[in-house]
């Protein structure tokens, strides 16, 4: 879900200094926070029920075109 530097900052587990540094970087850079927030919003919208349903229908249509009954004959 998180791509380092694109839509979030990753820190090693248990590394309080790295976490503090990441929080400080986000705190001091409003443009970075806004950009990451927009990317996260776009990523989250991919998982809205309507978008998921559309993606499944596209996948089913593609599979049917490749492997459907007409192709098996």
Image (tube, grey):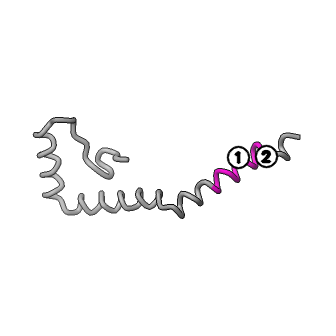
Residue 63 lies in the magenta stretch = yes
- Asked whether, in this view, residue 27 is left or right of residue 71, the answer is left
Quadrant of the image occupied by residue 50: bottom right
**Of helix, strand and loop, which one carries label 1?**
helix
Q: Position of residue 40 (x, y in %)?
A: 35, 57
Judged left or right of residue 58, residue 29 is: left
Q: Which residues are magenta?
A: 57-67
Q: Magenta segment, principal secondary structure?
A: helix
SS of the residue under disc 2: loop
What separation in Å lies between label 1 and label 2 (alpha carbons)? 7 Å
Provide residue 1's location: percent of width, then percent of height: 37, 47
Q: Which mark is residue 63?
A: 1
Question: Residue 7, image x and y in percent?
Answer: 32, 52
The residue closer to the viewer here, 52 or 28, is 52
Q: Relative to the observer, which residue lies in front, 66 or 29?
A: 66
Residue 34, position in %: x, y? 26, 63
Is residue 19 on the magenta stretch?
no
Q: In the rendered structure, are the residues bearing label 1 and label 2 in contact, judged by CB atoms less than 8 Å apart?
A: yes
Decide which of 13, 66 is in the foreground and name it.
Answer: 13
Q: Residue furthest front?
A: 49
Q: Residue 66 falls in which quadrant of the image?
A: top right
Residue at image point 12% right, 40% down = 16
Label disc, if present, on residue 33 of the rendered structure: none
Q: Is residue 42 above or below residue 14?
A: below
Mark 2, Cα crowd under 10 Å, few <14 / some 14-19 / many 20+, is: few
Q: Earlier in the sequence, mark 1 or mark 2?
A: 1
Q: Residues within 10 Å of mark 1 (few under 14, many from 20)?
A: few
Quarter of the rendering containing residue 45: bottom left
Residue occupying the point 21% across, 35% down: 13
- The numbered dot on residue 68 is 2
């Amino acid at each position: 879900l998180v791509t380092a530097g694109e839509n979030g900052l990753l820190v090693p587990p248990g590394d309080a200094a790295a976490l503090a540094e990441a929080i400080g970087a986000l705190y001091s850079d409003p443009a970075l926070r806004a950009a990451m927030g927009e990317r996260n919003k776009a990523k989250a919208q991919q998982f809205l029920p309507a978008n998921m349903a559309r993606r499944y229908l596209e996948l089913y249509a593609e599979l049917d075109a490749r492997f459907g009954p007409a192709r098996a004959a």
